[in-house]
Image (tube, helix red, strand yellow):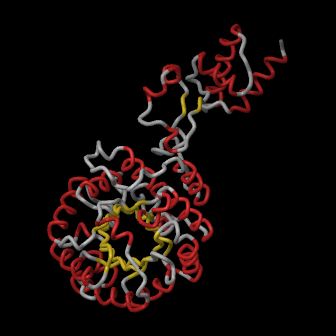
Amino acid sequence: MADLVRASAVAGRMVLWEESARDGAQAKTLMSAAFRVSLARAQGRIFGENGPAHVVFAAGFPAICDEEFDATRRVAHEAADAVSPAAVCRGTVDDVRQACRAVAGAPQARVMIVVPSSDEIADAMVHQPAATALATVTDLVHAARDTAPEVAVDVCFADAPRAEVGLLADRAEAVTDAGAGVIVIADTIGDLLPDQTTRLFTELRAAVSDRVVLASHLHNDLGLGVANTIAAVRSGVRVAACSWLGMAERSGMVATEQLLFLLAHRADQLGLPAGLWPAPPDLTPLSAIAKAVSAETGVPLSVTTPIVGTGVGTISTGTPFVRPATFQPFDPELVGITPTVVLTHLASDRVVHAVAQRLGHDLHRGDTAAVRRWVKTQAYQRNDAVIPDVEFAGFLSTLRASR
């Protein structure tokens, strides 16, 4: 079976490697099997019928327990028409074979073998030098191919920024020769800066042949997950790991919604070529998917969450109310958010009237000043900026009844 993911990357198309169900677990979250299936299908639909070519969905880490194995297998067999499902495993033959069994039989199924590539991480993980640990990776790829020949095999080099580029390049060539599809370069501790990311991927691409397909897996510990991933893509990487709401180990990794939006709507401004996808992704589900992930995992959407946060598309002051397009970087409707006016202590007369009308009340001109004073007084008395619609509607009903 043709490797759609590898083919997409070789053709210059973007592939998102979704990690919220797998690496997101290290953010102390847990997605049910049913939700993983639902999320995978929703994410694949963003790309229409091309979902399996543009989304690798890391469904789980089967070695954790029987329940995780079962959840991974459900995604593989219930969402494979929407994404390329993947199981993730450690670099042992037993783990590799188990991961293969979890996804075997599903179209476009993959396994990703995580191996240490720096001496620091290798000592912590397997108590060996990196060169020794990496010497057996080709055997692991062969074990996967022998166990499930139809399953694509990928290799993740953990802690790649602290590894020797020459060693990474040599092993990347070797495992590609052994049949690996994608080589994932992971900034496991999230310590890279954008210039360092550019240098790492530029040096690696120069050191390997065109047969080697590189992917990025970049954490957000310094708040630079998006910037670093964009740097990797500008360096030629076409497979990029991400996670809804940025969920992953410690401070997370690049957020799926942010990366997808930027690549879809700012590619030219980022210096990226046109045609990262054969057809533009449909971004209107982004807000709904983010809300569903938040509800499932308990990770909150905040006012300051970029692209899909609760503050996106909200207006509470006078001038933005009159000219909203002047005060926002993109149309919120692009990501499925309907703009709304929120009543706060900053409200102008126009804002007060607009919210009242939304709630079915037409203010008399003579009431405007009193209503505005009530709004501001309530906010300061409660030390809470937002006046809930239900409370404002109650006040307006009382005002009307008192006439």
In the image, residue 73 lies at what x, y percent?
55, 78
Q: Is residue 115 left or right of residue 289?
A: left
Residue 388, quarter of picture:
top right
Task: Give me the residue at 69% from left, 23% from top.
Answer: 356
User: In this picture, is 374 found above or below 60?
Assistant: above
User: In this picture, is 107 found above or below 293?
Assistant: below
Task: Give me the residue at 38% from left, 76% from top.
Answer: 2
Placement of the C terminus among the 4 image quadrants:
top right
- Identify which residue, 40 or 221, lies in the foreground: 40
- Identify which residue, 239 or 280, lies in the foreground: 280
Residue 402, quarter of picture:
top right
Q: Total number of numbered labels?
A: 0
Placement of the N terminus among the 4 image quadrants:
bottom left
Q: Is residue 263 left or right of residue 205?
A: right
In the image, residue 340 lies at what x, y percent?
59, 32
Task: Give me the residue at 18% from left, 59% from top.
Answer: 199
Residue 213, quarter of picture:
bottom left
In the image, residue 123 lies at what x, y percent?
28, 80
- Identify which residue, 294 or 152, lies in the foreground: 152
Q: Is residue 222 left or right of residue 54?
A: left
User: In this picture, is 379 found above or below 203?
Assistant: above
In the image, residue 3 lies at what x, y percent?
37, 74
